[in-house]
Amino acid sequence: TNIRPDMHRVLPQRILNILTRAGETARSMGYQVYAVGGLVRDVLLKVENLDVDLVVEGKGIELAHKLAETIGGRVRAHEKFGTAEIVFQDGYWVDVVTARVEYYEYPAALPQVEQSSLKHDLYRRDFTINAMAVALNPERFGELVDYFNGREDLQIGAVRVLHNLSFIEDPTRILRAIRFEQRYDMAIEPQTLRLIKEAVREKVLARLSTERMWGELKSILEEADPEDMMDRMSELGVWDYLFPEITFWEVQPVISEMPQALMILRNWGWAEPAERWLPYFLAILHWTTQETAFEICQRYFLGRRQTDKVLDVIAHWRRALKSLSATGDVPLSELTKSVQTLPREAYPLFLTLLEDKNAIRRFRLVMESVHKNKPSVNGKDIRAMGFQPGPMYRRALDAVWRARLDGLVQTREEELEYARNYLIQHNAPKIEPKKPKGNN
Ligand code: ATP
C-alpha cells in the first residue's frame, strides 16, 4: 500500500519537503531511507505529527550531512551509535539513525539483507502501531512497510507488543502502553495486558532508573488529558512506583478538574507555561509536605528553579486560598500580593481549589490585573531619576504597582511621581556624580 495521499493531507509542507529531500539524498548515495514510528502511525490516524525519525539503510551520519546541505540545519553526530540530529535555527530537529546492515553475513544477497536491517530496527520498537515505516526514496515514496500488522492494530485499536519479553527488556514501555492506549482511545491487547501485570508483579519498575521513569512520566503529564492515564496507572499498580508517598485517590478529584481549569485560564489570557507538565505535577504534589515534595523533586532530578516553584506552591497555596475566599473588602493589591507568591504554573491547580463563585471572580480579577495593569515605569526610569541601583528599585516598583491596582495612580506621570516620592521617603541613595573622564 502507498500512503502518499494521506501524507500530503496530514503533514505540513515543511515536513513533506524534508521527507522528499531525504529520499532524494538517499537515492543519490545508493541508500534506502524511511520515516518510522510516531509519524507513520499518526499519518494513518490522520493526526498531525511533526517528529521526523529517519532510519537509513546505509551510513546514517553521512546521509544526515548530505541532507543538511540541501535543507539546512546543523548536524550533531554520535559516531558511536551511528545516529545524528539535524538541528535547525528555530530549534526544530530531525533524528537520523543507521539500521545495522550485516554485510558480512550474506555478502551475496545485499538487497535482502538491507531489507531485513530495517525489519531488525523496527523489531526493537515498543508496539506494532509504532513499528511501521514509510519508504521515502523517490521511486518508492509513500510505500508503507508494515512487518507486524501495525495498521490492522491501529484499525482495531489494539496496543500490542512485538514479543513477550518487551516489558522486561524495557519497563518504560508499561507507561508508554498506557499513554498510547488512553491518548487514542484504544485498548491494551489482552496478552500485552497480561505481560504488563506480570511485569508489575515482578517489580520490573523498581529496577528502572528514576531518570527514565521521569522521561515517560513527563510525557504523560504533558498530554492533553492525563487523568485517564493516571487512573490506569493506579489500576495497574504503576502509580505506587512513581509516587509511593501519594495516594492517587486523594489527588484524583483535583486532577479530574484540571482540564477544565486549564481551559478557563486560557480564556482568561493565561499563557501556557514552557514546562507544560508542571501544572499537573503541582496538582499531584500540592497536598504533601515540603519534605516529601523535596524528596520527590530530588528523585526526579528537577532543577533548582523547578523545585523552588514546587515548594513555593506547597508553602503558599493555603494562604492564597484563604485570602481570596475571605469575605469583606480586601484591597486588590492585598489579594494580588497573596496570589503573586504562587508561580503561574500553579494557577490551574489553584482554580480547582477555589470553591465559591466570589472567590473565583476575585481570582480572575487578580489575574487580569496582573496582566493588564502592568505599570509603565521600570528600572530605567528610576535610574534616570538618579537613584542608585539596588533593592529599593524592586520595592519602589512594587509600590507603584500596588498603587495602580488600587487606583491611586493612573497615568505614567502619576506613576513616576509616585515612584519618586516613595524613593525619597525611604531614603533611597542617589547616584554620586562621577567626575568626567578626560576624553570627551
Ligand atoms: P509521541 O506522539 O508521543 O511523540 P512517538 O511514538 O513519536 O509518540 P517517541 O517517544 O518520540 O514517541 O518515540 C518515537 C519512536 O521510537 C516510537 O514511535 C517507537 O517506535 C520508538 N520508541 C520510543 N521509545 C521506545 C521504547 N521505550 N521502546 C521501544 N521503542 C521505543
Image: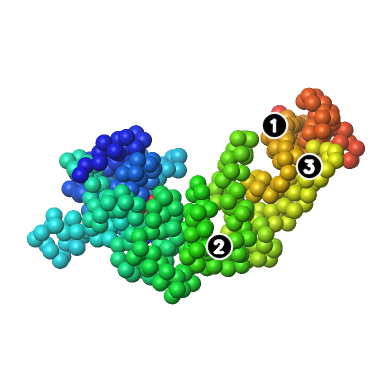
Q: Is residue 184 above or below residue 201?
A: above
Name the residue: 59% across, 38% down: 266
Callout 1 crowding tier (Cα within 10 Å): few <14, some 14–19, many ≥20: few
Check disc 3 and give the amino acid type.
Leu
Q: Is residue 29 visible?
A: yes
Earlier residue among tags 3 and 2: 2
Q: Is residue 278 above or below residue 203?
A: above
Give how far apart the Cα atoms at labels 2 and 1 are.
36 Å
Q: Could you tell me residue 341's position as x and y percent?
A: 73, 48
On the image, numbered disc 1 is attached to which residue?
Answer: 372
Callout 2 crowding tier (Cα within 10 Å): few <14, some 14–19, many ≥20: some
Seen as rendered, the residue at the extreme bottom is 202
Rendering quadrant holding ligand 1: bottom left
Check disc 2 and give the amino acid type.
Tyr
Give how far apart the Cα atoms at labels 1 and 3 are.
16 Å
Left or right position of 85 against 425: left
Name the residue: 15% across, 66% down: 105
Q: Nearer the viewer, residue 295 or 158?
A: 158
On the image, numbered disc 2 is attached to which residue?
Answer: 300
Q: Secondary structure at mark 1?
A: helix
Give how far apart the Cα atoms at labels 3 and 2 are.
34 Å
On the image, numbered disc 3 is attached to which residue?
Answer: 335
